Image (cartoon, rainbow, N blue to C red):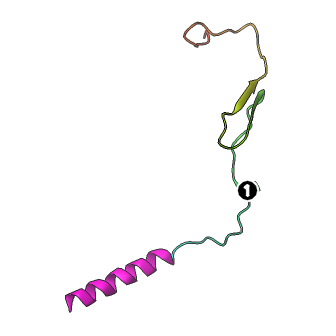
């Protein structure tokens, strides 16, 4: 009797958790929030390959020191 009750509870729990999703399958890649663009930054490359990152030169007056910190 306990095994039957445990099996019934496990199947009800499995059904309840599987039925809670709302995946209609209608989401498009364009609907995904990619955040804000960073001006002067470009990243390209094929999936699985090392990306090519290009950064446009900006304010030449502020240069980072050897540690990579910009002066305040």
Q: Residue at x 44, y 79 (%)?
A: 16
Residue 5 belongs to magenta span? yes
- In this view of the protein, which residue sits in the foreground, 65 or 8? 8
Q: Is residue 45 above or below residue 32?
A: above
Q: Residue at x 74, y 7 (%)?
A: 61
Classify residue 23 by image quadrant.
bottom right
* Left or right placement of residue 39 versus residue 48 in this view: right
Question: Count the marks: how many?
Answer: 1
- What residue is disc 1 on? 29
Name the residue at the left extreme: 2
Classify residue 13 by image quadrant.
bottom left
- In this view of the protein, which residue sits in the foreground, 3 or 36? 3
Classify residue 40 by image quadrant.
top right
Q: Position of residue 37 (x, y in %)?
A: 74, 37
Q: Position of residue 14 (x, y in %)?
A: 41, 78
Residue 6 belongs to magenta span? yes
- What element does badge 1 sit on? helix
For the record, the magenta segment spans: 1-19
- In this view of the protein, which residue sits in the foreground, 17 or 72? 17
Q: Position of residue 69 (x, y in %)?
A: 58, 13
Prevailing secondary structure class for the magenta stretch in the rendered image: helix
Q: Position of residue 3 (x, y in %)?
A: 23, 87
| Quadrant placement of the C terminus | top right
Q: Is residue 30 above or below residue 20?
A: above
Name the residue at the bottom extreme: 1
| Quadrant placement of the N terminus | bottom left
Q: Residue at x 77, y 17 (%)?
A: 58
Crowd rating for badge 1 (residues with CA inside 10 Å; few <14, some 14–19, many 20+): few
């Amino acid at each position: 009797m306990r095994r039957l009750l445990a099996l019934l509870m496990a199947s009800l729990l499995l059904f309840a958790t599987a039925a809670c999703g709302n995946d209609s399958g209608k989401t498009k890649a364009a609907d995904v929030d990619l955040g804000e663009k960073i001006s002067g930054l470009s990243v390209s490359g094929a999936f699985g390959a090392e990306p090519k990152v290009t950064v446009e030169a900006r304010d030449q007056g502020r240069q980072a020191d050897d540690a990579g910190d910009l002066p305040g």
